[in-house]
Amino acid sequence: MTNPFKAALAGKHVVVVGGGSGMGKATAQMAVGMGAQVTIASRNVAKLSAVASEIGGNVTTSPVDMTDEPGIRVWATSLGTVDHLVISASSAAHGAFADLPTTDLRAMFDAKFTGPYVTAREVLPYLAEGASITLFSGVLSRRPSAGATGLGAVNAAVEALAKGLAQELAGRARVNCISPGMVATKAYADMSEADRAGMYAQVGKALPVGRVGKAEEIAQTAVMAMTNGFLTGAILDVDGGHMVRA
Ligand SMILES: NC(=O)c1ccc[n+]([C@@H]2O[C@H](COP(=O)([O-])OP(=O)(O)OC[C@H]3O[C@@H](n4cnc5c(N)ncnc54)[C@H](OP(=O)(O)O)[C@@H]3O)[C@@H](O)[C@H]2O)c1
């Protein structure tokens, strides 16, 4: 039997902004395995090169900083035709409502909302027929948590962006948003190993699946979002049951 994902992705150009780490890297790796030509983008050139060598196959690197609008404009012109744009890059700011510095809040909106907005807009002229755009939010959008109100708000904004674009870009591109639960990635690299393991155990225990997620599990959903021509305007909760937990 033909693999429908492979059949739909083979030979397609997939651009993953955030492809240097975590879920973006796993998505890039899976897309390459399905025969796609993949461009990975993020800020750190050395990291991108190391990841491209690790993945091997049909991967090219193309550095970009999503907070640099003129830079994004130039970068977009260098991509050629794009079949699928995946934007997993982001930054997060945690802090109590009364304490979180406004500069941190603005920087987070800049990287996680305005960055993907501008990136999608600048890549739009280069999208091929049948293209898709996949954005990333997170469970805090609809299940807020104390100390992460700003992060919840930016995630909700990204989801609204995906739904709005699905309507506005109808006929040009399908647009979906993946909302991950806690997934073990470099996003938590700043914590000590012990603290990180403790957090994963605690969060995992509260979920119906009993553990936190793996980047590959999110990549499976990204591949589905790229290849399913009937999917648009969807918020895909891949969260181990976070939304239905007690
Ligand atoms: N991990 C989780 O538990 C979790 C939970 C809910 C939602 N999410 C969301 O899921 C998405 C993927 O998360 P992840 O854990 O895979 O992240 P990650 O491992 O931290 O990777 C983030 C990537 O984004 C790049 N990046 C950061 N800022 C950038 C910028 N301004 N311009 C370009 N690239 C930038 C980073 O590379 P450079 O630093 O080299 O630029 C890195 O490659 C994010 O939107 C995140 O908010 C994650």
Image: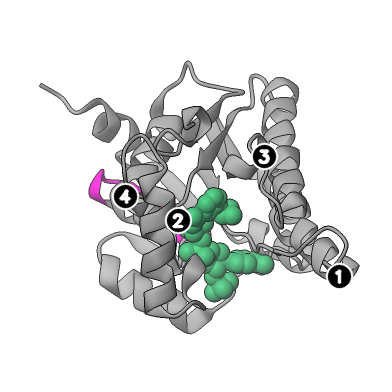
Question: Percent from the top left, x then y, of residue 245?
Answer: 47, 32
Whole-number angstrom distance, CA of label 4 to CA of label 1 = 34 Å
Whole-number angstrom distance, CA of label 1 to CA of label 3 = 20 Å
Which marked residue is nearer to the observer: mark 1 or mark 2? 1
Which marked residue is nearer to the observer: mark 3 or mark 4? 3
Q: How is the image coloured?
A: one colour
Which marked residue is nearer to the observer: mark 2 or mark 4? 4
| Residue designated by label 2 | 24
Tag 4 and tag 1, C-beta contact below 8 Å: no
| Residue designated by label 1 | 101
| Residue designated by label 3 | 141
- Mark 3 C-beta closer than 8 Å to ligand 1: no
Residue 53 visible to the viewer: yes
Whole-number angstrom distance, CA of label 3 to CA of label 4 = 22 Å
**Along the viewing direction, whichever of 97 and 152 lies nearer the viewer:** 97
Classify mark 4: helix, strand or loop: helix
Q: Quadrant of residue 240?
A: top left
Whole-number angstrom distance, CA of label 1 to CA of label 2 = 28 Å
Of the image marks 1 and 2, the number of the one nearer the N terminus: 2
Disc 4 residue type? Glu
Of the image marks 2 and 4, the number of the one nearer the N terminus: 2
Q: Which residues are magenta?
A: 33-39
- Mark 2 C-beta closer than 8 Å to ligand 1: yes
